[in-house]
């Protein structure tokens, strides 16, 4: 079941901002997986020796971990006043 908001979208709503951050993280994970699997696939297909591929993977994985840590541990979603 897809995530849903319990009320109409309001960018000031804490629930909206939390869902937005989780969806952005899911997009980040998807891009990471698609890019790195594509690099691995074409590297094997062309029998290429790309030393930068490991550094790209490790660097992006660290960014992904930091993003996940922020979204699921550090971010606080208090209602902004209006």
Image (cartoon, rainbow, N blue to C red):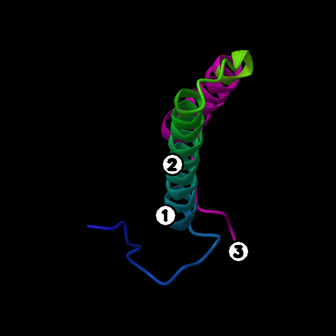
Which one is closest to the eye, mark 3 or mark 2? 2
Can the viewer see residue 23? yes
| Residues at marks 3 and 1, CA–CA distance in whole angstroms | 16 Å
Tell me the residue at 57%/54% (across/down): 21
User: Disc 2 designates what residue?
Assistant: 30
Q: In this view, does 64 lie above or below 75?
A: above
Give coordinates of residue 15: x percent, y percent: 49, 63
Give coordinates of residue 82: x percent, y percent: 70, 74
| Residues at marks 2 and 1, CA–CA distance in whole angstroms | 23 Å
Q: Is residue 46 magenta?
A: no
Tell me the residue at 53%/33% (across/down): 45
Q: In this view, does 66 lie above or below 21?
A: above
User: Disc 1 designates what residue?
Assistant: 15
Instruction: Using the image as rendered, state which of residue 20 and residue 7 is in the foreground.
Output: 20
Q: Is residue 80 above or below residue 5?
A: above
Give coordinates of residue 69: x percent, y percent: 54, 31
Which span is picked out in magenta? 54-82
Q: Is mark 2 on a helix, strand or loop?
A: helix
Tell me the residue at 59%/77% (across/down): 10
């Amino acid at each position: 079941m897809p995530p849903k908001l319990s009320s109409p979208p309001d960018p000031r709503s804490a629930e909206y901002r939390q869902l937005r951050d989780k969806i952005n993280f899911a997009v980040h994970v998807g891009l990471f997986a698609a890019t790195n699997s594509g690099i691995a696939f074409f590297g094997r297909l062309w029998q290429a020796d790309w030393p930068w591929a490991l550094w790209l993977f490790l660097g992006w994985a660290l960014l992904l971990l930091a993003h996940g840590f922020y979204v699921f541990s550090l971010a606080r979603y208090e209602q902004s006043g209006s």
